[in-house]
């Protein structure tokens, strides 16, 4: 005989019922405000929602909006969630709504509502009394406990009507019978009921349907059931190497393979780039050139000039050099007089140049070093230094950016701050964006339009975006330096498409234990941001209101190394 302590392994039933599928769809519709579709689905299927996606129960209760609460409760299946208090809570909401209708003078409506729900109130009241053993001995019952709930409410309404009879309207609303409410303060009763609603009503996790679908697709791809489709673009026959390398002007006919998630099969489609004016670039497979520095110098930072050719580098010996594209960046540009005369731009000897930024028109170059010093150069002229100022005291400059008209310079530093300096005011400090708990790695300007009308000039807002080693990206109002939003990618597992990685501003000053350093950010058109943490996954994020921080796309590498993605250019 086997031991009584032996437990057999139980198998979990992973089958999905049709009602669960309908509940997931209902949650998705409710979350996206498709109330008409939600009501039509519930009426046709007869299946109510398993939980709520709303979190406004306390606010509704505090304002006495019992009509809205009852409408939302009517859409829920109160038998789910394992909470036996929901029927009692429903009864309390009805009771409170009837009493407040009477208090407002709507006695006819209060009596009509009472007649509609009297049977349900009495039945729930009886079940509650039996569960609490209140009917064990009739002698133990108080006079009120022995009266049905509907009869109690009717007596309170009758007492209210008799008290207010033949009274002036100005005095009527202030008159209430004794013990009309269960406690003297009506607002405290509202708050308590709102708190009960928040605790008792099951909450559906955000983007639950999208999360399950994304996980299912990832699992099928992991197990080989889901085809991994690669898009192949075939060059025209007869192309030589020179033509094939011209990736910026070559438009090619392509044959694309995609997978239709709904149909569950691979679709082949022949398309021509001339139809949609799309340029497909070849994958970089070979090193184009190598730039050589001195024996004791090492490159620290590099940017391309807006002209699309010149390469500007800053090195560990403090020098700034502009390289000639016609020589495959093996020689310096000798059409610049200061380089021809061997008068190179630079900082103090052996002070690393750590950041570079070029103005939108390409005339100015801003450079920062490891000691927090900023210099602004006129690179297309005689190479004169126009501005020189200490932006951060003995702190590494990690990033620089000009504003759209090159009158202001944005700086990021390892001292955990981002600052804005006016170039027309001799490098005067204009604003400071403070709030990160670790060094700031990136900073950028973002011109956004949060309205639907792109023609309204007053709706365009200039914002500042900063990224930090504390694992957060922060959005600031450039005019007031006010913190608007905080975005933090998850560290445990990649966020799925449709998820929100926005976190509350309050209580976010400290660094989380398992945070991912934000290595790079790229502000893109259409209020989008490419966020690159030091992990195996990068994210395309929406910055549009009302849901900034929503993941639009994820980019991951199949076999990440220990450090994962280090940079994207």
Image (tube, helix red, strand yellow):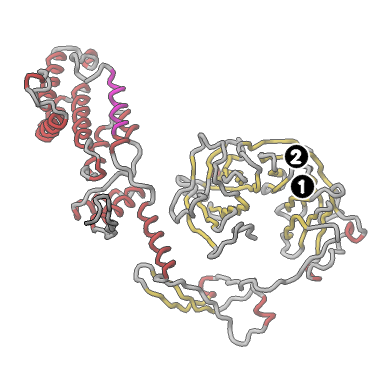
Q: Quadrant of residue 59?
A: top left
Residue 564, above or below 231: above
The quadrant in which the N terminus is found is bottom left
Which residue is found at the position 58% from the left and 83% from the top? 236
Which residue is found at the position 15% from the left and 24% from the top? 107
Mark 1 or mark 2, earlier in chain: 1
Give the residue at mark 1. Answer: 368
Q: How far is disc 1 from disc 2 in space, using C-alphas? A: 9 Å
Give the residue at mark 2. Answer: 391
Is any atom of residue 268 visible in this view? yes
Q: Position of residue 95 (x, y in %)?
A: 19, 28
**Closer-to-camera residue (314/389):** 314
Q: Position of residue 349 (x, y in %)?
A: 87, 49
Q: Position of residue 308 (x, y in %)?
A: 72, 64
Q: Is residue 411 left or right of residue 203?
A: right
The quadrant in which the C terminus is found is bottom right
Secondary structure beneath dot 2 equals loop
Q: Within the magenta stretch, is there residue 543?
A: no
Q: Which segment did they paint magenta?
A: 185-196
Q: Quadrant of residue 71?
A: top left
The answer to whether marks 1 and 2 mark residues whose Cβ atoms lie closer than 8 Å is yes
**Closer-to-camera residue (414/473):** 414
Q: Position of residue 527 (x, y in %)?
A: 53, 51
Which residue is found at the position 68% from the left and 81% from the top? 241
């Amino acid at each position: 005989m086997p031991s009584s302590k032996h437990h057999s392994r139980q198998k979990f039933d992973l089958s999905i019922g049709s009602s669960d599928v309908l509940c997931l769809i209902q949650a998705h519709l409710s979350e996206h405000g498709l109330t008409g579709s939600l009501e039509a689905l519930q009426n046709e299927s007869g299946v109510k929602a398993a939980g709520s996606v709303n979190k406004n129960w306390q606010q509704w209760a505090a304002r006495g909006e019992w009509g809205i609460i009852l409408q939302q409760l009517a859409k829920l299946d109160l038998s789910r969630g394992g909470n036996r208090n929901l029927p009692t809570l429903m009864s309390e909401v009805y009771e409170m709504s009837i009493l407040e209708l009477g208090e407002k003078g709507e006695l006819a409506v209060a009596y009509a509502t009472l007649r509609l729900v009297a049977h349900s109130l009495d039945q729930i009241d009886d079940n509650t009394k039996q569960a609490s053993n209140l009917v064990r001995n009739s002698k133990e019952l108080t006079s009120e406990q022995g009266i049905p709930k509907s009869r109690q409410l009717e007596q309170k309404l009758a007492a209210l009507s008799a008290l207010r009879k033949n009274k002036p309207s100005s005095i009527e609303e202030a008159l209430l019978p004794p013990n009309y409410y269960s406690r003297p303060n009506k607002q405290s009763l509202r708050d308590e009921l709102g708190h009960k609603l928040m605790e008792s009503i099951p909450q559906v996790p955000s983007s639950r349907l999208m999360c399950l679908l994304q996980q299912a697709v990832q699992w099928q791809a992991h197990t080989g059931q889901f085809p991994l489709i690669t898009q192949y673009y075939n060059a025209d026959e007869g192309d030589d190497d020179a033509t094939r390398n011209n990736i910026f002007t070559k438009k090619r006919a392509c044959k694309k393979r995609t997978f239709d998630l709904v149909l569950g099969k691979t679709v082949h489609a022949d398309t021509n780039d001339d139809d949609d004016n799309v340029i497909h670039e070849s994958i970089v497979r070979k090193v184009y050139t190598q730039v050589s520095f001195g024996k004791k110098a090492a490159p620290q930072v590099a940017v391309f000039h807006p002209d699309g050719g010149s390469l500007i580098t800053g090195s560990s010996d403090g020098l700034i050099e502009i390289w000639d594209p016609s020589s495959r960046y093996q020689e310096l540009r000798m059409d610049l007089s200061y380089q021809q005369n061997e008068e190179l731009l630079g900082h103090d000897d052996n002070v690393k140049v750590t950041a570079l930024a070029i103005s939108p028109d390409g005339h100015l170059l801003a450079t920062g070093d490891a000691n927090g010093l900023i210099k602004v150069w006129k690179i297309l002229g005689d190479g004169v230094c126009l501005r020189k100022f200490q932006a951060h005291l003995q702190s590494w400059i990690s990033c620089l950016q000009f504003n759209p008209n090159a009158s202001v310079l944005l700086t990021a530093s390892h001292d955990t701050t981002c600052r804005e300096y006016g170039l027309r005011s001799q490098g005067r400090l204009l604003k400071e964006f403070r709030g990160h708990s670790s060094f700031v790695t990136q900073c950028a300007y973002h011109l956004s339009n949060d309205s639907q009308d792109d023609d309204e000039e007053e709706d365009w807002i200039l914002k500042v975006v900063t990224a930090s080693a504390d694992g957060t990206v922060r959005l600031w109002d450039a005019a007031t330096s006010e913190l608007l939003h905080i975005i933090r990618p998850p560290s445990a597992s990649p966020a799925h498409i449709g998820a929100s990685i926005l976190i509350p501003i309050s209580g976010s000053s400290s660094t989380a234990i398992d945070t991912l350093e934000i290595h790079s950010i790229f502000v893109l058109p259409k209020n989008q941001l490419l966020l690159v943490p030091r992990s195996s996954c990068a994210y395309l994020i929406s910055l549009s209101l009302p849901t900034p921080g929503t993941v639009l796309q994820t980019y991951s590498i199949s076999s990440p190394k220990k450090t994962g993605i280090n940079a994207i250019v």
